[in-house]
Image (cartoon, grey):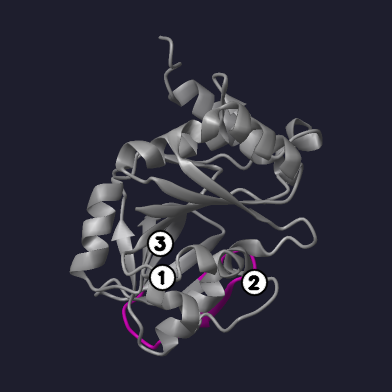
Amino acid sequence: MKAMVLAAGLGTRLRPLTNDRPKALVEIHGRTLLEITLTRLREFGVEDVIVNVHHFADRLVELLAARKNFGLNILISNEDELLLDTGGGLKKAAWFFANDSEPFLVHNVDVLSDIDLGKMLQFHREHEALATLAVQERPSSRQLLFDDAGLLCGRRFETEQRTELARKAQPLRSLAFCGIHVISPRLLPMTNESGVFSIIETYLRLAGQNERIVAFRADDAYWRDLGTLESLEQAANEVPHPDS
């Protein structure tokens, strides 16, 4: 199975830790976020990975070489000229998945979770989804909106009190995205957005065309966004030290 790790972000909320390194090389208990993510993917059965890079990209590449790619076949998608966001980053790396028929995983590097990837993949196949998004019912400034069948219908920006709907349905359930996707390769040629864009924009457009973008509920799983110093500290207190 193949996967993409989204690791190109600037990590501004993690400063000063990211003043001299990409956020993927920030550590918890002596292990970088990149190592934690790649190890989890390898243990699930992923063999081939593409990692997008931008901020201090050379340091990330050097680590991979020093650690022999953590036992994986890894290629780099370099966004050195322009940071492309999640959708633009995936579109730039689309060639890596273009000739495949099997779904692939996309995983944010700054997400720590024990979400069951096997159940998520099975769910994706059973629901014949174009994309499956791991979601939880929890507070978030940006919520995705799903109908009773678990199909994506829109999104809600809580801070701005603004809602965007791609499909009309009632009732709608607000769920927070966990930064983990299972995607069918047939989505790639359907991605007609260009430049810098969020993959959520693509999902919403396709949902409006009645494509199956579905919610995988992971409410009982451990999950934490590691994008801030506070959340990083919380994760360090919650996750056992590997030597303990």
Q: Is residue 80 above or below residue 146?
A: above
First reached walking from the N terminus: tag 3 or tag 1: 1
Q: Residue furthest left?
A: 126
Disc 3 on helix, strand or loop? strand
Amino acid found under the numbered disc labelled 3: Leu
Estimate the spatial distance between the alpha carbons at disc 3 and disc 2, rounded to whole Å.
21 Å
Q: Is residue 149 above or below residue 133?
A: below
Residue 32 in picture, x, y percent from top left: 58, 29
Q: Contact (CB < 8 A) between labels 1 and 2? A: no
Amino acid found under the numbered disc labelled 1: Asn
Residue 129 in picture, x, y percent from top left: 29, 73
In this picture, residue 176 sits left or right of residue 78: left
**Towards the viewer: 218 or 199:** 199
- Residue pictured at 73% horizontal, 48% vertical: 10
Q: Contact (CB < 8 A) between labels 3 and 2? A: no
The overriding secondary structure of the stretch rendered in magenta is loop
Disc 1 on helix, strand or loop? loop
Q: Contact (CB < 8 A) between labels 3 and 1? A: no
On residue 175, the disc is 3
Residue 83 in picture, x, y percent from top left: 73, 60
**Mark 3 neighbour class, 10 Å CA radius: few under 14, some 14 to 19, many 20 or more:** many
- Residue pictured at 58% horizontal, 32% vertical: 232
**Towards the viewer: 239 or 61:** 61
Instruction: Tell me which segment is drawn in magenta.
Output: 156-172
**Towards the viewer: 20 or 142:** 20
Instruction: Write down the residue under mark 2.
Output: 197
Which mark lies nearer to you, 1 or 2? 1
Instruction: Write down the residue under mark 1.
Output: 99
